[in-house]
Amino acid sequence: MRTYRVFVKKGKAGDFEDLIMLREGINVCALLFGPIWMLVHKLWLILTLWIAVFSLSFLLLDFLVSLTNISYFESVPIALIIILYMLPGVISEDLRQKKLMSSGYELLGYSMGSEESDARMRFFDAIGNDNMETEGVKTVL
């Protein structure tokens, strides 16, 4: 079972305009294709910061390697670059949550299901029954 965060954008009348479910955990697409994933999800500021940190760390580590003749520093830049490249995949859903919340979405709760459609049905069943603490659904109101 997967856990999903449920975000909702409320209209002027207080009704739900839009509902988005974000899956908890590591996003494989963001892990392998971090910059492209950030472009697709319109995370411009995060992408700019990521490029700056990635470039500066690459330049700094390249400077350290040229400054010293120790072979240990030759493997450190590769490891750090791999970690920095994979970082968006680890924190991708948190980045999307911050973007959604800044766009007017609210965290309504959590739902579980084997797929997003199952979690969505379970969430709507819990709301329809006015029982917000059914198994697999937890709301944050």
Image: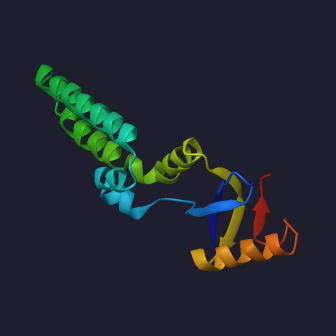
Q: Residue furthest front?
A: 13
Question: Residue 38: horizontal and vertical position, in percent?
Answer: 36, 50
- In the displayed structure, would residue 119 be above or below residue 34? below
**63 to the left or right of 135:** left
**105 to the left or right of 51:** right
20 and 93: which is toward the camera: 20
Question: Residue 23: horizontal and vertical position, in percent?
Answer: 56, 63
- In the displayed structure, would residue 118 be above or below residue 101? below
**66 to the left or right of 118:** left
- The image quadrant that residue 17 belongs to is bottom right
Which residue occupies 31% across, 47% down? 85
Q: Is residue 32 visible?
A: yes
74 and 21: which is toward the camera: 21
Question: Residue 102: horizontal and vertical position, in percent?
Answer: 56, 41
Which residue occupies 45% across, 61% down? 27
Which residue occupies 29% across, 43% down? 79
How many labels were placed on the picture?
Answer: 0
Which residue occupies 59% across, 45% down? 101
- The image quadrant that residue 128 belongs to is bottom right
**119 to the left or right of 87:** right
Question: Residue 112: horizontal and vertical position, in percent?
Answer: 68, 71
- The image quadrant that residue 25 belongs to is bottom right
Q: Quadrant of the N terminus?
A: bottom right
